[in-house]
Amino acid sequence: MDAPKALRDLTRRAHVALRVSMVEGALHALMVGVAESYLGAFAVELGHGPRQLALLSTLPLLAGAAVQLASPVLCALLGSRKRLALMGALGQTASLAALLAIASTECRSVAALLVAQLCFWVSGGAMAPAWNAWMATLTVHTDRSAYFARRSALNQLALLLAFGGAGYALHHAGVPVLSCFVALFAVGFVARLASVIVLSAQADLEPPPRLPASQARIVGRARTAWHGSEFRVAGYMCALAFGTHLAAPFFTPYMLRELALDYRGYALLSSAAILAKALTFPSCHRIAARVGHARLLRWAGAGVAVTPLLWACSSDFGVLLFAHVVGGVVWAAVEYSSYQLLLDSAPADLTAEFFSIANCMTGLAQVSGAFLGGFILSHQLLSYPALFVLSALLRSMPLALFAAQRSQDSALLRELYTRFNALRSTDAGRSLLVGSELPRALGSRTTDPPPAL
């Protein structure tokens, strides 16, 4: 088969796999909407207090973050990113079965719920870098930004329908509410199982080479990825995750306990954020094309920092609804732009390792923030509104990373412009500038960076 025909065939197979991935993403979003999104409310309904909620929102995240460091090696030993992704998805399916059993028996043991959530997040963490690298390969020959904008929008719409439907069911469930959680976890189990089946039909066109155990060294490969990657964006997301999760795990108990909202109001607020994200995602591609992903991330990051202040200012339902809409818009832009920038930061041959480190950093930051927030609330050091103000402050601080980079970029462009004026009089000077200095100075790549999710 000649090279052009082989490339066309590879591109066609990738497009088919990407369409399958759209379906799998919608099924996964359905599971998230009816099950994962209500884990906090489920813990509250079981009667667990701030300390238990802090434990449930930190330890599973920590385990899920730590296991990602082993994901690239597991992927190499298995010889397939697809196999590891399927194993992780099946692990989450089993976790949903455990949650279904807990709801059915009305088990109020913190340990049982903690084990189920540990299995859920560890399975998801193990598969995440492999899935990211898998999607990176599939989108090399496509308009990556446009594809992920469409995929994210579809996922958010599926999530909106699932979350809204679950909230409606809980609101009209009557007493006991736990019986409704049984139905929700059952739907989540079926949806995740269906996504596993669809995921198995998605092709992995360039599986990584199988490594012998003697060469599969977690520390060595992680060290290589660490030294060969750009972690500025990953560092920003890590710092943002710390400030966000200082308060994020406690929005649910704040709404259900402190504000005494019913499930209809709770679902309406959260659905407003999901709908705002769904409507924003398709526009992110066009906005980023005009202003750039880095600038979009800076603007959206500023909006993320402002959002908790709205929570702190008022408990009026209208204000909270506005806060959720604003939050949905800015978080959509943050998630979209940061993901595209992380794709550009990953080395082509160590994509899974890079994302395992970046995701682990973010997960550890989430755990640290949630643990600190739980400590503050359990010891009554701050009220909920004061904690939200502190979260806003911590969310704004990482923007200094981009402010410093912006001044460096300006200085670099001025230097390049000066050198261009000095060299443009000769053909040799132009060749030197365009062929060597500009790519090296700006950190551009000679090959397309692999995308991921």
Image (cartoon, grey):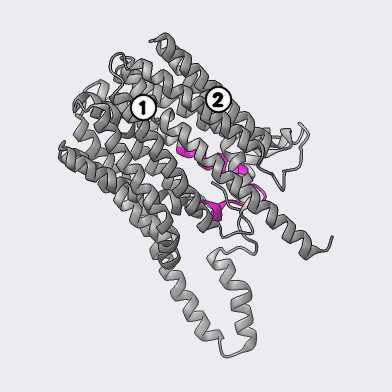
Mark 2 or 1, nearer chain start: 2
Task: Report the disc number at residue 93.
Answer: 2
Element marked by disc 1: helix
Magenta highlight range? 342-362
Give residue 440's position: percent from left, percent from top. Answer: 59, 67
Judged left or right of residue 72, residue 321 is: left
The percent position of residue 214, horizontal first and vertical second, equals 77, 32
Q: CA distance from mark 2 to mark 1?
A: 27 Å
State the residue at coordinates (71%, 48%): 205
Task: Find residue 393 and report its image quarter.
Answer: top left
Above or below: residue 155 compared with residue 191: below
- Judge whether residue 348 is colored magenta: yes
Front-most of residues 448 and 237? 448
Amino acid at dot 1? Phe
Around disc 2, counting alpha carbons within 10 Å, would you say few (fewer than 14), some (14 to 19), or many (20 or more)?
many
What residue do we see at 32% from left, 43% from top? 273
**Residue at the spot of label 1:** 371
Q: Main secondary structure of the magenta part?
A: helix
Q: Is residue 392 above or below residue 192?
A: below
Residue 258 at least partly seen: yes
Q: Residue at x 24, y 44 (%)?
A: 323
Q: Residues within 10 Å of mark 1 (few under 14, many from 20)?
A: many
When asked about the image quadrant of residue 55, the answer is top left
Q: Amino acid at mark 2?
A: Thr
Residue 199, which numbered label? none
Please say if the residues under marks 2 and 1 sit with CB atoms less than 8 Å apart: no
Q: Is residue 110 found left or right of 361 in the rendered image?
A: left
334 falls in the magenta region = no
Q: Is residue 165 above or below residue 95?
A: below
